[in-house]
Amino acid sequence: MGWFNTFINSSLGKKFIMALTGSFLIIFLIIHLIGNITLYFGPDAFNGYVKTLDVIKPLIRIIELVLLSAFIFHIFNGVRLWLENKQARPVTYKVNGSPENTTLFSRTMFVSGSVIFIFLVLHLGTFFWRFNVHDPQQLADSHQYYDIVVGFFQIWWYVLLYVIAMILLGFHLNHGFQSAFQTFGWNHKKYTPLIKKIGTAYAIIMAVGFASMPIYFFFFYGGNQ
Amino acid sequence: MEAKKLNLKLKIWRQKNSNSVGSFVDYDVQVSPDASFLEMLDELNNRLEANNEEPIVFESDCREGICGTCGLVINGHPHGPLPKIATCQLHMRNFKDGETIWVEPFRAKAFPVIKDLMVDRSGFDKILQAGGYISVNTGGAPDANSIPVPKDAASEAFDAAACIGCGACVAACKNASAMLFVSAKISHLGLLPQGQPERYIRVQRMIKVMDELGFGSCTNTYACEAECPKGISVTNIARMNRDYVRAKFTSKIAEV
Ligand code: HEM
Ligand code: SF4
Ligand code: FES
């Protein structure tokens, strides 16, 4: 396995892992968003959705494990690359031309990723923890998933952080989507312009889709009595 | 009739040697808009020498955009603000009277400053020595066109071969990555029949040395393509990525 170690520790290998884990997360986000949309259809729809996930729990646990490792490798490699890339230019430029030759999205990947990470910790601490660890039996019986989510969406700072994180997620995805294709070696003038458009559309749908829920429940939701 | 001269304020990076700390020094110059950027520096150096001051060290050779020695970072852009030219092809008519111009050396750990604006780019030579060649037997020159090359491969290889090894891609990249340069060489050789025998060894050897020299990793910002004087495309980096993954996963020779 010596060759594999050389591969994943090479500059290209590290990029490859970023792209592989990033692509997995991209697919995960689609499924996550579709599931969350049930929030808009009321308590029964959302609680029913969470219950359905409960029925296939073993499968979900496996997916969660893959997801966790994807995040760990993505974040570990992301931080490592960022540090190494900083070291590659010890003395920086006085005048930096990068605003004119690169996109804001591509320059801020580490920042956007870090905010997503902070959000992720909070997100797991609130929803994942309460759904899975914090007395799940009592929860499952009384179907209170919906109430927990809506409850958090009444807290202004939570909503604010949520929305900011989703905007930055959009930034991250707008660059990351097409970047992953380039890393895999798929760049051709026939399809790359389309990939970039799909990536931007995907980023907007994800950012708006996820951010719409806290916004809706904070501003427009009058309770389900 | 001679055009009106431009008054410019130059802020030029001066650094005694690779171990010392550099800083910017101000120079006021009057220059003809017809002069090239390097001619302006030549004139300034004449003046400095006449005053018994140390002239500014910068590199140049061909002064026609083909040798790749003349890279300077001008107002934050390697080879200046115009696309697809080398510093030696930049003329002062592109600047406004009264403008302040910042001139810095290429900045990268793998390109240490030797003096002032001159950097050591021998890292590129080391990468080329690792695999940027094809092995051929000595003997009489082969007949032209004895090996058929498809037109599209020839064109693409030629585009990649236009790389002059100037290092502007490294200078422009926020990660000081050399991947545009390396991928240009990989493509240039790997697209042609003569480059096939060593194709998958070459990519591994060159990338190994590239990593060891302390260049950063590409994060696909594409600043390199935007600043490259020869318009080398990042599709070459995609090809290099493909070749490297393929080499690592399918090559039967245990290499590097
Ligand atoms: C749902 C969450 C996330 C998704 C879908 C995602 C997706 C992606 C994708 C597709 C890439 C491009 C890979 C490539 O360049 O080939 C990427 C790059 C990156 N991500 Fe994420 N990411 C996520 C979360 C994070 C987090 C939490 C961090 C934390 C630090 C992070 C940091 C980075 C960094 C540093 C890069 C490399 C930047 C670059 O190449 O310019 N990402 N991400
Ligand atoms: S790829 Fe372009 S910028 Fe990089 S060394 Fe070659 S010619 Fe210079
Ligand atoms: S001096 Fe040769 S490219 Fe500029």
Image (cartoon, rainbow, N blue to C red):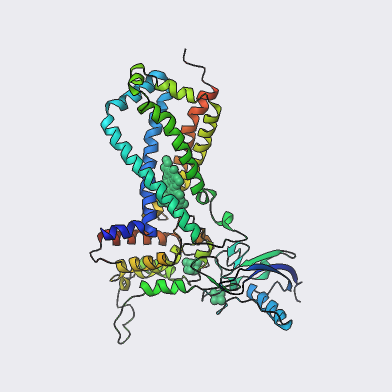
From what the image shows, is residue A33 above or below residue B159? above
Q: Total of numbered circles in the picture? A: 0
Q: Is residue B119 left or right of residue A132?
A: right
The location of residue B85, given as percent across then percent down, is: 56, 68
The location of residue B24, given as percent across then percent down, is: 66, 67
Q: Residue at x 52, y 51 (%)?
A: A107
Which is nearer the eye, B233 or B19? Answer: B19
Asked if residue A194 can be seen in this view, the reply is no
The location of residue B238, given as percent across then percent down, is: 39, 58
Q: Is residue B60 left or right of residue B247?
A: right
The location of residue A73, given as percent across then percent down, is: 37, 47
Determine the residue located farthest toward the left in the rendered image.
B252
Which is nearer the eye, A178 or B120? Answer: B120
From what the image shows, is residue A132 above or below residue B255? above
- Residue B195 falls in image quadrant: bottom left
Which is nearer the eye, B159 or B218? Answer: B218
- Residue B44 falls in image quadrant: bottom right
Which is nearer the eye, A134 or B42? Answer: A134
Q: Is residue A209 left or right of residue B201?
A: right
From what the image shows, is residue B77 above or below residue B88? above
Determine the residue located farthest toward the top in the rendered image.
A225
Determine the residue located farthest toward the bottom in the rendered image.
B140
Asked if residue A22 can be seen in this view, the reply is yes
Quarter that holds the N terminus of chain A: bottom left
